Amino acid sequence: MRTTISIPDDLRARLLRLAGKRGKKGYSDIVCEALEEYLAKEEDREKLIDRALKLEGILTSEEAENTEKRIKELWDRWSL
């Protein structure tokens, strides 16, 4: 299906260069590929959020506090 979208000139130029490297004249396939990947990642992210929300209330208050404390300790020791 054809549709019209507005994209910045520099992004269009990058798409055309990539299409040329792939031996294509246009960039529709690349845009479709990118959209598929983005939407799949977004769906995965939503599933992870749903799974996390289902865990709410599974720990006792004490377990939750201990877990939060342990996570904070790990973050504090994390050095980049």
Image (cartoon, rainbow, N blue to C red):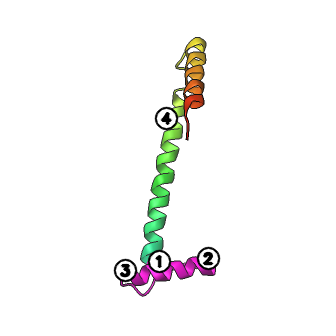
In this rendering, is residue 18 above or below 54? below
Q: Which numbered disc flags the more N-terminal residue, 4 or 1?
A: 1
Outermost left residue: 23
- Give amino acid for label 1: Met
* Marks 3 and 1 in Cβ contact (< 8 Å): no
Q: Given this view, does label 3 or label 1 mark the residue nearer the observer?
A: 3
Q: Which numbered disc flags the more N-terminal residue, 2 or 3?
A: 2
* Marks 2 and 1 in Cβ contact (< 8 Å): no
Q: Nearer the viewer, residue 8 or 5?
A: 8
Q: CA distance from mark 4 to mark 1?
A: 35 Å
Q: Helix or strand or loop: what does disc 3 sit on?
A: loop
Q: CA distance from mark 4 to mark 2?
A: 35 Å
| Quarter of the figure with the C terminus | top right
Q: Which numbered disc flags the more N-terminal residue, 4 or 2?
A: 2
For disc 4, the neighbor class at 10 Å (few under 14, some 14 to 19, many from 20) is few
The residue that label 2 is drawn on is: 7
Q: Helix or strand or loop: what does disc 1 sit on?
A: loop
The residue that label 4 is drawn on is: 51
- Give amino acid for label 2: Ile
Residue 1 location, x and y as percent? 47, 77
Q: CA distance from mark 2 to mark 3?
A: 21 Å
The residue that label 3 is drawn on is: 22
Q: Helix or strand or loop: what does disc 2 sit on?
A: loop
Outermost bottom residue: 25
Residue range of the region highlighted in magenta in the rendering: 1-28
Q: Which numbered disc flags the more N-terminal residue, 3 or 1?
A: 1
